[in-house]
Amino acid sequence: KQEVTQIPAALSVPEGENLVLNCSFTDSAIYNLQWFRQDPGKGLTSLLLIQSSQREQTSGRLNASLDKSSGRSTLYIAASQPGDSATYLCAVMNTGFQKLVFGTGTRLLVSP
Amino acid sequence: GAVVSQHPSRVICKSGTSVKIECRSLDFQATTMFWYRQFPKQSLMLMATSNEGSKATYEQGVEKDKFLINHASLTLSTLTVTSAHPEDSSFYICSASIAGARQETQYFGPGTRLLVL
């Protein structure tokens, strides 16, 4: 059974810092991995999707990497801003299934 | 494009009543819709997968008689929480994947917060 864990559970940083969020998964037979953002009481916004054959994806100040063999992914946020404050979720889709298995999330607070 | 809506966004009901939540794909046809539940400060847990015109597939531990799912058209799926109890209070989120497109892309609705008194 796939299990997804995110570290740290919460993170508070001053504006401008570069930061890294971590995601690990137990079953390396994944089809893809996604990073989502969730604002309080809201739905999910997809940030980046990495296919199992890819090593990383970039979008603006965000960069996500994937090391499938070791069961790890990182989300790098450059020059953080208060507007980045949210909960970040990673989710994996196992090969042969459409289901997404979500991680526990990292609550990020960027203070001005 | 690829917008998913949910209605209502928030509902408060008395214990023992039934509540229906709608999930609509506004600008695309969705072959498959997914229903998730999220308890406070916890992650999303998949409840069930529904395909248009067929019975939903429930995850282990989810009572299909309590959480009725109907996917009657390619743009609408409904989740009915029957005889709701306070422990059913949660944030319910649906997602939809586009018919004919790569199935790994799910578009999420804004969620419905249910409070059972």
Image (cartoon, coloured by chain):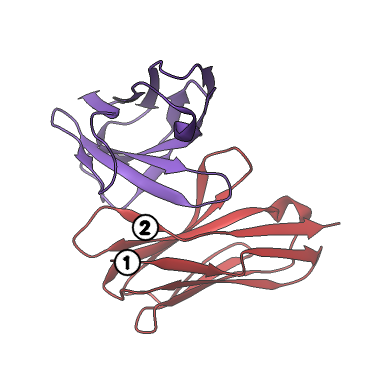
Chain colours: A red, B purple
Q: As shown in the figure, which amino acid type bears the numbered disc 2?
A: Val
Dividing the picture into quadrants, the one containing residue B50 is: top left
Tell me what residue is drawn at x 36 percent, y 58 percent.
A101
| For the residues bearing labels 1 and 2, Cβ distance under 8 angstroms | yes
Give neighbour class at mark 2: few <14, some 14-19, many 20+ (Cα, 10 Å). Answer: many
* Residue A78 vertical position relative to residue A83 in the rendered view, above or below: below
At x 47%, y 35%, the residue is B87
- Residue on which disc 2 sits: A101
Identify the subunit bearing mark 1. A
Residue A22 spot, x, y in % from top left: 55, 72
Residue B47 percent across, percent down from the top left: 32, 42
Residue type at mark 1 is: Gln
Query: What element does badge 2 sit on?
Result: strand
How many residues crowd around disc 1 within 10 Å: few (fewer than 14), some, or many (20 or more)? some
State left or right for residue A108 relative to residue B58: right
| Numbered badge on residue A23 | none
Using the rendered image, report if marks 1 and 2 lie on a common chain: yes
Evaluate whether residue A66 shows in this view.
no
Q: Residue B107, image x and y in percent? A: 40, 42
User: Residue B37, percent across and down?
Assistant: 42, 41
Query: Quarter of the image holding residue B82?
Result: top left
Image point (77%, 70%), residue name = A17
Q: Is residue B50 visible?
A: yes
Q: Chain of mark 2?
A: A
Mark 1 lies on residue: A2
Q: Earlier in the sequence, mark 1 or mark 2?
A: 1
Q: Residue at x 26, y 73 (%)?
A: A29
The tally of labels here is: 2
Q: Nearer the viewer, residue B114 or A64?
A: B114
Residue A13 relative to residue A69: left or right: right
Question: At numbered mark 1, what does the secondary structure look like: helix, strand or loop?
Answer: loop
